[in-house]
Amino acid sequence: MDSGLAVPAIGVTILVLIAVAILLARPRLNARRRRADGDDVDADPSVSPAEYRRLAGAAAARSEWRTAVVEQFRAIVRAAEDRAIIDPLPGRTADEVAGQLAGAFSGHAPELRRAARVFDGIRYGSADATARDHAGVVALDQLLETAKPDYGRPAADNLALPR
């Protein structure tokens, strides 16, 4: 190969490799961004239900109702995971949590659906939260904490259970 052609060929090869690397890395970067902005619950498995409840209570004490509701819903998720009622699943949505828990606590399916709707409206919409919203999620958390799962009955309101 002529040395006059070798230098441009090497340069073009390097540019092609850089372009391929960018194309391969970009979907991963977009996936991370999508997950951060996605519609999942984001309950951190390293945070205990008690810690989420503490965070919710502290936010409620400051009248930060949006944060209080989100953290309290996460406490429900983590408590259910700790009790092995649902499996830890990154990226799970509030609706999926409600559906899965409704399979175990069919008598509380309407409250679960409402809590998921409130969570979504606050976390991913522009809905404001109130002390009443927080109190409702706290009451649901307390009900589920003492309720015994019953996997033999279908969900009372026919929520679909994710596979």
Image (cartoon, helix red, strand yellow):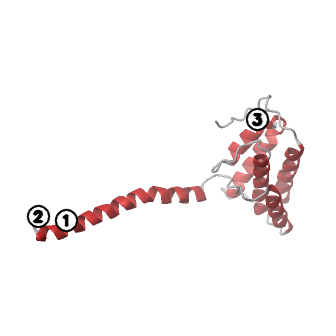
Amino acid on which the number 2 mark rests in the picture: Met
Classify mark 3: residues with Cα within 10 Å, few (<14), some (14-19) or many (20+): many
Name the N-terminal-most of marks 3 and 2: 2
Which residue is found at the position 81% from the left and 66% from the top? Answer: 59
Q: Which residue is mark 1?
A: 9
Q: Where, by quadrant of the figure, is residue 103 drawn?
A: top right
| Residue located beneath label 2 in the image | 1
User: Label 1 near label 2: C-beta < 8 Å?
Assistant: yes
Where is the C terminus found, in terms of image quarters? top right
Horizontally, residue 28 falls left or right of residue 94, namely left
Tell me the amino acid under the disc marked 3: Gly
Please tell me whether mark 1 sits on a helix, a strand or a loop. helix
Which amino acid type is shown beneath numbered disc 1?
A: Ala
Q: Is residue 113 above or below residue 51?
A: above
CA distance separating discs 3 and 2: 70 Å
Vertical arrangement, residue 98 with respect to residue 122, above or below = above
Any mark on residue 65, and which? none
Residue at 79% of width from left, 59% of height from top? 52
Q: Earlier in the sequence, mark 1 or mark 3?
A: 1
Front residue of this view, candidates 45 and 119: 45
**Residue 102 % position (x, y):** 77, 38
CA gap, disc 2 and disc 1: 10 Å
Mark carried by residue 103 = 3
